[in-house]
Image: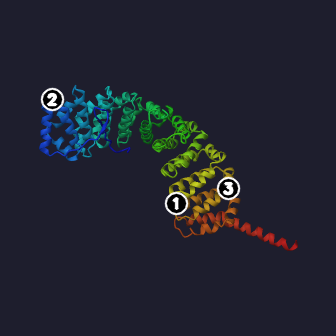
Amino acid sequence: QLVSKRLLREEVNGDGQLCLTSTQLFVFHQVLQLLRDVQRGREERKKLLSRLRQGLQHKETQQKFVRLEGSMRVLIGLFTSSLANIQMEAARCLHELSHSCDPAVAEACLPATSYLLTYLSGHSVEFTELCLYTLGNLAVESDAVRKQLLPQGIIPALASCIQSPHVAVLEGLGYVLSQLLQATEAPTKIIPLVLDSVLPQHMLRLVSSNLELGMGVAVEFAWCLHYIVCSHVNNALLISQGIVSTLVLLLLELASVMSKAATEGLELLICPVLRCLSNLLVEDETEGCKVQIQDERLLVALFLFMQYFLQQHPFLVQECLWLLNNLTADEPFFCSAVLTLDLLPALLQLLSCSRMVTLLALTVLCNIAEKGPAYCYQLHQKAVLPSLLSTLALSDAQVVGQSLELLHLLFLHLPEAADDFLSQAGLQALEQHQDNPQLQERVRALSETYLQPAAASLISCAGASAAVLPSS
């Protein structure tokens, strides 16, 4: 949905009712005759253009049309007509061509791009929307189109258009922008122009509009922000413009309405917002980001999302855990918050989910354990060892390896955890992996460093007790 071309084919008849279009496959001479009729026609021109549009829904007719000498010149001439109904029908023909998967058809539309940009400032919402989606379709896979659009001023045109009050126009603009931002040349040629414009401020405004403009607008611009952040062109600028606080507040708002409003499609908005924050946190010079993001309510929101979407959209649980991992990696604030807000039981429950969810949950637990004895003590008190025994029973080397890392941190900072591990048949759980080439060194190191001394200590204590018993 995010990278494919989009097609507008809804028609409304004179009674305001939605009509379905029919399609017709034309042979070459029919296309030629139809083109001639369009050139000569006056009163029937709109009907002829409508027939042409229906024909252009077929790949074969599209290819025949663009190969006809003068065909695009005639169509663009009608597209620039002073008659609104003729202009609209010609725009629909161009839109059909823009949806073609044949690069030659897209490049045949090159002469129309300057007019498409000019008409973005028009007064008809439907016409502007059609021009936007046509531009977006042409920009998807055609380097030639994108190369032409930039000097023609597509970024200033979009910057002006984004101030429109119309939802349909804003959604269409978001689509065009997302296609441009995903281009291979975007980091060097497109994103710098976008960042130098007013577009980022307006994108942040539209994303945080509390869905007043509908889900579609927020989704489009959230993904646009994600593409910009991923480029690492100038995230410091976005941070200075308030992207972090804006997105955190948006997540808090979405979490607060989860149980009150319809949530269909909400995952498409939450996902890019989570990714933006996760990527911003791993930037080299984003101390300001980490300060702005310190809000315990964010953790509550993340766990609410994970609980809510676990069954229907498990991919979103991974996104939440990725952000949680980045939050807890170097920051004691969030590690403490996971414990003080009693979110650890919910985190441990995720260890029984899919492989990737389990891995990410284990990584977060390692981040917490790494903070020292006080944190390991609380992990131990919350029964982390029984959960680890379950993950050690799995055959996945990565999951087991991450479980071993967590055990190492626990035993390092809390030696008594090794005693409890042994008493819960932990040694037997480790022995099943001692012949695995990927794990045997780590198993041996864990056993020799922590478990064998602990076992010896237990035996010694047991012997001492036995020696005392007869005298009592």
Q: Quadrant of the C terminus?
A: bottom right
Q: Residue sitting at 71 percent across and 59 percent down?
A: 416
Q: Helix, strand or loop at disc 3? A: helix
Q: Please provide percent x and percent y for residue 92.
A: 26, 36
| Residue under label 1 | 398
Circle 3 residues within 10 Å: few <14, some 14–19, many ≥20: some
| Residue under label 3 | 380
Q: Residue sitting at 59 percent across and 62 percent down?
A: 390
Query: Distance between the Cα atoms at labels 2 and 1?
Result: 71 Å
Q: Helix, strand or loop at disc 2? A: loop
Q: In this rendering, would 295 be left or right of 214?
A: right
Circle 2 residues within 10 Å: few <14, some 14–19, many ≥20: few
Q: Please provide percent x and percent y for residue 302.
A: 56, 45
Query: Distance between the Cα atoms at labels 1 and 3?
Result: 22 Å
Q: Please provide percent x and percent y for residue 357.
A: 52, 54
Q: Mark 1: which amino acid?
A: Gln
